[in-house]
Amino acid sequence: MKFSLNIDHIATLRNARGEVQPDPITFALMAEQYGVDGIVVHLREDRRHINERDVRLLRELITTKLDLEMAAVDEIIEIARDVQPELATIVPERRQELTTEGGINVIDNINHLRNTVERLHDAEVPVSLFIEPDINQIDAASEINADFIEIHTGKFANAISEEEIFDELERIRIAAKHAKKLGLGVNAGHGLNYNNMKEFIAIKDIDEVSIGHAIIARSVFVGIEKAIKEMIQIINRA
Ligand code: PXP
């Protein structure tokens, strides 16, 4: 299982003062030195954290890979076509939300998403769709030629009882296996942290996890190097 780091919240902190520190680009380059497999950023329409300058600098400077999370809207699709990240992950986006709250509904938006996938493919950008662990959504993602899915792990991360945790893990396990059978790459993310990853690593069909908040929060206490290496150690135990 690979591990990409979402650095949005370094930009959140920078933007809190409207100045240049802490610089997300420097953070990304340091994270690469400490062993992450890729850098993830979400370029939101409202630019509340990552901005276009960040995306373009990351494109130039990082040596792992860039996963650009984005809504399926014209402005951002055009930026993605120009920047050509290694992966564009399509997420639902609501202005009022604190973070991405759920997976995208591929079935209900199939024509628009088919067109979005085509436009990104025309620019040689592979596409991932951020969806719930739901077989019908996965089938729809495959039907419109997505290259990857990213399974939304929020329900698993928020589960409290043993039974609920087991059920959510089972749902993700079945979904990941189904997606693999269809030839899709399988990523996962949202709410994964140092505790729940110990259980999550048991799921074999996940190619990569995308983790942000837990790592950024821990790095405030123990530093970037330790925060990243602790997570890599948990993943490598699998
Ligand atoms: N994957 C996607 C598609 C996301 O939108 C997010 C949140 O920005 C993450 C992963 C990372 O979630 P977290 O910050 O909770 O680790």
Image: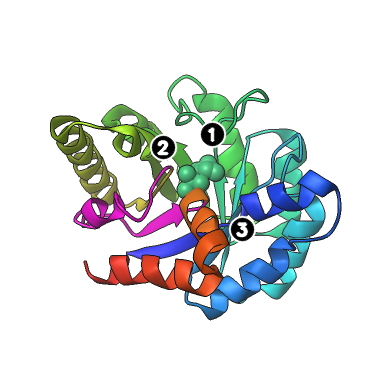
Which mark, by number, is residue 171?
none
The CA span between labels 2 and 3 is: 18 Å
Query: Closer to us: mark 1 or mark 3?
Result: 1
Residue nearest the viewer, comparing 119 with 67: 67
Left or right of 10 on screen, residue 198: left
Magenta stretch encompasses residue 164: no
Where is residue 129 drawn, in percent x and y? 47, 41
Residue range corresponding to the magenta coloring: 191-212
Where is residue 50 drawn, in percent x and y? 72, 49
**Would you say the magenta stretch is mainly helix, strand or loop?**
loop
Q: Is residue 61 visible?
A: yes
Where does label 2 land, which residue? 141
Magenta stretch encompasses residue 209: yes
Where is residue 143 drawn, in percent x and y? 39, 36
Q: Residue at x 32, y 64 (%)?
A: 1
Q: Amino acid at mark 2?
A: Ala
Where does label 1 land, which residue? 100
Q: Residue at x 74, y 71 (%)?
A: 60
Where does label 3 land, which residue? 124
SS at circle 3: loop
Quarter of the figure with residue 25: bottom right
* Between discs 1 and 3, the one toward the N terminus: 1
Q: Is residue 235 above or below residue 105?
A: below
SS at circle 1: loop
Q: Residue at x 44, y 51 (%)?
A: 147
Residue nearest the viewer, comparing 141 with 39: 39
